[in-house]
């Protein structure tokens, strides 16, 4: 498994930093965000290190990550109510951890700046 020494998510994959794991398979780890923005806020990452979604991700890892997003949503019980997945990439999107990750967000209505939604 390719690993970057200074990458905190590689350290989480290796078990050097603890995480609250929601789902795991041979290619993917999904764990709760340490600073949740929503009742459900899970990060889905490939165990292999890629800087971001545009960093030559293998077909196998791409499929595994996307499948895991669905698994996480099922585990969290947010398929029917709805959820959002997003992946910030580089500076303009304010990516802060440069190991590909997909945020899975849900568990409450998102107001998206609409004051009529709580
Ligand atoms: P980004 O800003 O790169 O899209 O998202 C990085 C996310 O990783 C942030 O939401 C941040 O809260 C989360 N995060 C950063 N360090 C850790 C950590 O050590 N453990 C966990 N569980 N989440 C982390
Ligand atoms: Zn990494």
Image (cartoon, helix red, strand yellow):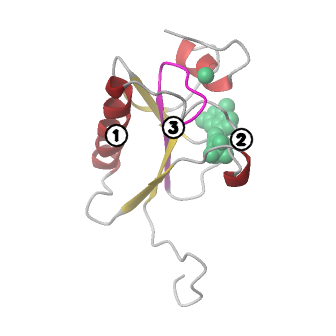
At numbered mark 2, what does the secondary structure look like: helix, strand or loop?
loop
Residue occupying image coordinates x 54% and y 90%? 116
Q: Quadrant of ligand 2?
A: top right
Q: Which residue lies furthest to the bottom in this view?
A: 116
Tell me the magenta residue range.
40-52
Q: Closest to the observer: 65 or 108?
A: 65
Q: In this view, does 107 lie to the left or right of 26?
A: right
Q: Which mark is residue 79?
A: none
Q: Closest to the observer: 51 or 13?
A: 51
Give the labeled residue for mark 2.
96
Q: Residue 84's quadrant in the figure?
A: bottom left
Q: Which of marks 2 and 3 is in front?
A: 3
| Label 2: few (<14), some (14–19) or many (≥20) C-alpha neighbours in 10 Å | few
Give the labeled residue for mark 1.
66
At numbered mark 1, what does the secondary structure look like: helix, strand or loop?
helix
Q: Closest to the observer: 30 or 92?
A: 92
Q: Tell me, yes or no, whether the highlighted magenta stretch contains residue 76.
A: no
The disc, 3 or 1, on the residue closer to the chain's N-terminal end is: 3
Residue 76 percent across, percent down from the top left: 35, 49
| Label 1: few (<14), some (14–19) or many (≥20) C-alpha neighbours in 10 Å | some
Q: Are marks 3 and 1 in contact (CB under 8 Å)?
A: no
Give the labeled residue for mark 3.
53
């Amino acid at each position: 498994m390719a690993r970057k020494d200074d990458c905190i998510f590689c350290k989480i994959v290796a078990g050097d930093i603890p995480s609250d794991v929601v789902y795991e398979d041979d290619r993917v780890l999904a764990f709760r965000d340490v600073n949740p923005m929503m009742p459900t806020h899970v990060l889905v990452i490939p165990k292999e290190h890629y800087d971001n979604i545009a960093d030559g991700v293998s077909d196998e890892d791409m499929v595994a990550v996307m499948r895991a997003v669905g698994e996480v949503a099922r585990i969290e019980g947010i398929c029917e109510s709805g959820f959002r997945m997003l992946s910030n990439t580089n500076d303009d999107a304010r990516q802060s951890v440069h190991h590909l990750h997909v945020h899975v967000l849900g568990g409450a209505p998102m107001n998206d700046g609409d004051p009529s939604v709580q």
